[in-house]
Amino acid sequence: MVNVDLLPAFADNYIFCFRAGGSGVFIVDPGDAGPVHDYLQKTGHAPAAILVTHHHADHVGGVRELAAHYAIPVYGPRQRTPGLTHPLSAGRQLIEGIPMEVIAVPGHTLDHVAYLVEDALFCGDTLFSAGCGRLFEGTPAQMHDSLERLGSLPGDTRVYCAHEYTLSNLRFARHVEPDNAALLDREREVSSIRKAGLPSIPSRMDIEQDGNPFLRTRIAAVQKAARTFDPSCDITDPVAVFAALRRWKDQF
Ligand SMILES: [Zn+2]
């Protein structure tokens, strides 16, 4: 069992602290050291390592300070991970003795990785609940492939995405698929969760498969919507549908 705690940071980031199989705490994407110091002090847990998904400042801003303060290793992409001690390649591996699958998910950035630990997926800024990350470095084809890879994980996978964007993503998703009843239910659920001041994260992969337009490029209603936005879109090509949706969301 992977025990995950969410630490809010900045306006809408989450830093994840998890323990698996009696391990110390793995700290995922500490954009800010402060909340992690507070968490470790409050819980008394021993930190094991830092895991980085990608190089953006809101994910790595606290890495050097935490690594130095606690003398813990830093795992992440080979390029541009501050304080990196263990550059990662994709595949199944033991990280500090814990089995994990490192999944290469280029698109938001070229070097982006996701971590799958048992049923918990830490996917950074690749897959969001009801949405996906912007394409800062990669191509639509790369991001589409990355999302297909994540979307093929089992339905009960817990999805820990790094931002609280769910409600605004759902507004776009419902615009794309107004007749998708699952989306209406999800929006009601997330609205009440957020009104109570609670996080909408983790999501579950089956929830994403049923409503996230960026995982649904092969669904006729989504293809039709993509063509409404861009009449030149070749809806027989899932990458073209994805690219149209992403451009649409960028200006929504
Ligand atoms: Zn990012």
Image (cartoon, rainbow, N blue to C red):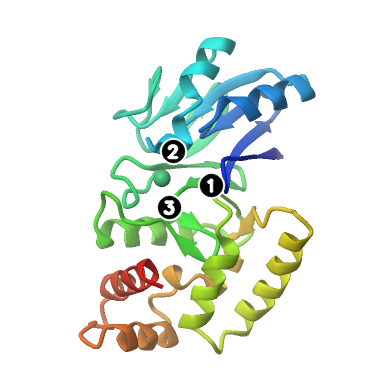
Residue 22: quarter of image? top right
Quick check: which quadrant has ligand 1?
top left
Q: Position of residue 209 (x, y in %)?
A: 53, 69
Q: Does ligand 1 reach within 8 Å of label 3's beta carbon?
A: no
Which residue is under mark 3? 126
Q: Residue at x 60, y 28 (%)?
A: 26
Q: Are marks 2 and 3 in contact (CB under 8 Å)?
A: yes
Q: Position of residue 156 (x, y in %)?
A: 64, 59
Vertical relation: 166 (above or below) 77:
below
Is 226 or 147 nearer to us in this picture?
Answer: 226
Does residue 71 appear anywhere in the picture? no
Query: Badge 2: few (under 14), some or many (20 or more) residues near its Cα, within 10 Å?
Result: many
Q: Amino acid at mark 2?
A: Thr
Query: Badge 3: few (under 14), some or many (20 or more) residues near its Cα, within 10 Å?
Result: many
Image quadrant where one finds the N terminus: top right
Q: Amino acid at mark 3?
A: Thr
